[in-house]
Image (cartoon, rainbow, N blue to C red):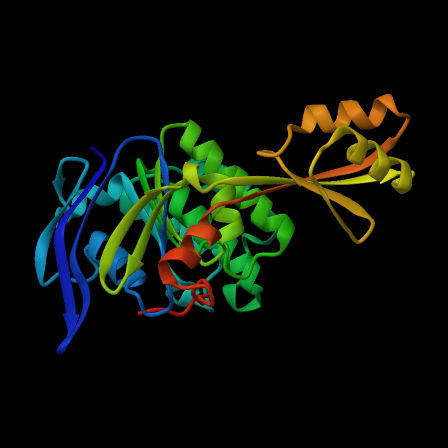
Amino acid sequence: MILSVRDVTKSYGKDPVLKGVSFELAEAQITALVGPNGSGKSTLLNIIANLLPADTGTVTVLGSSNKDTKMFRHVSFMQDNIVLYDYLTGYDHLQFICEVQGLSEDQLLAAAERIGITSYLRKKVKNYSLGMKQHLLLAMAIVNQPKLLILDEPLNGLDPTSAIRVRELLLSLRAEGTTILLSSHNLAEIDRVTSAILFLKNGELIQEDLAAFEQIRYQITALPLEKALQTLETAGIPFEQADGNLRFLEKACTLDRVLQELTQQGVTIQDIDKNISGSEERYRMIFGGGAKADAPAEV
């Protein structure tokens, strides 16, 4: 077992934040921690990383107590960019980690190249954009090739291209055997990397496999549109028309059949967009129809 959290409680004064939280993470999986702002996600992550003491309960990492500082040779925790120093360069930050953990410069440069920060590695952090800081934090988190990677809002401040790269990185790390626990308010991206989600509500944990709630929706741009509409209607395929595009759920009909019906009638397919949803639907069921995923700032 990579991570075991047992009956963890935490209160601030008379206000309970975590009420007997328990869960386990096995090897090579990505699990998301989701909840409204103030639900205690960051508190829980800080307790796991032994940066904050729990009132009661235990946390075991790689078979040892999380209070054993040796765990950080195999565990990384990516926090908010407030941990960065404006007057140091990205290289300085990575070099400090490498010196503490006995890592080589080759490992430093490999992490920087993998994240794509080599072009500004020698610049001071005060000149970094929010996205550049997020990239540096990711490089700092993977430089020691951790077995357990804990990420607090890793997609915060990233443009769509960078978010795609981070998603691909997470999937690649999982394939290499890294177990990942991440908190995020970006439910769309969560759906793309995992269906294992821990919902935190009123200090209690709701553990879900979202396979039962997952929906895959396709949007197709096809010409001529009128012919495409007539073809799908004749074939009895349920669809929606929006902004000149065709939309349908995979549960209603497979993409292969839709494409086959259209191409057989001489319809040209210009573009296909795939959207996976599941966490948002379940989030609304748990937290209410008007609920929104949390903002980055959090207790």
Position of residue 153 relative to residue 223, above or below, is below
**Quarter containing the C terminus:** bottom left
Res. 131 image quadrant:
bottom right
Direction left: furthest residue: 56
Q: Position of residue 111 (x, y in %)?
A: 47, 40
Horizontally, is 76 left or right of 112 in the view?
A: left
The quadrant of the picture occupied by the N terminus is top left
Q: How many marks?
A: 0
Coordinates of residue 150 in the picture (x, y in percent): 33, 48
Q: Nearer the viewer, residue 205 or 51?
A: 205
Quarter assignment of residue 10: bottom left
Residue 91: tell me if it is visible.
no
Q: Residue at x 20, y 42 (%)?
A: 71
Percent x, y for residue 85? 42, 66
- The one of 231 and 41 positioned closer to us in this rendering: 231
Residue at 36% over, 57% down: 286
In the depicted view, which residue is nearer to us: 202 or 71? 202
Q: x%, y% of residue 15?
A: 17, 75
In terms of depth relative to the viewer, which is nearer, 49 or 58? 58
Viewer can see residue 228: yes
Residue at 22%, 63% (x, y): give it.
203
Q: Is residue 31 left or right of residue 7?
A: right
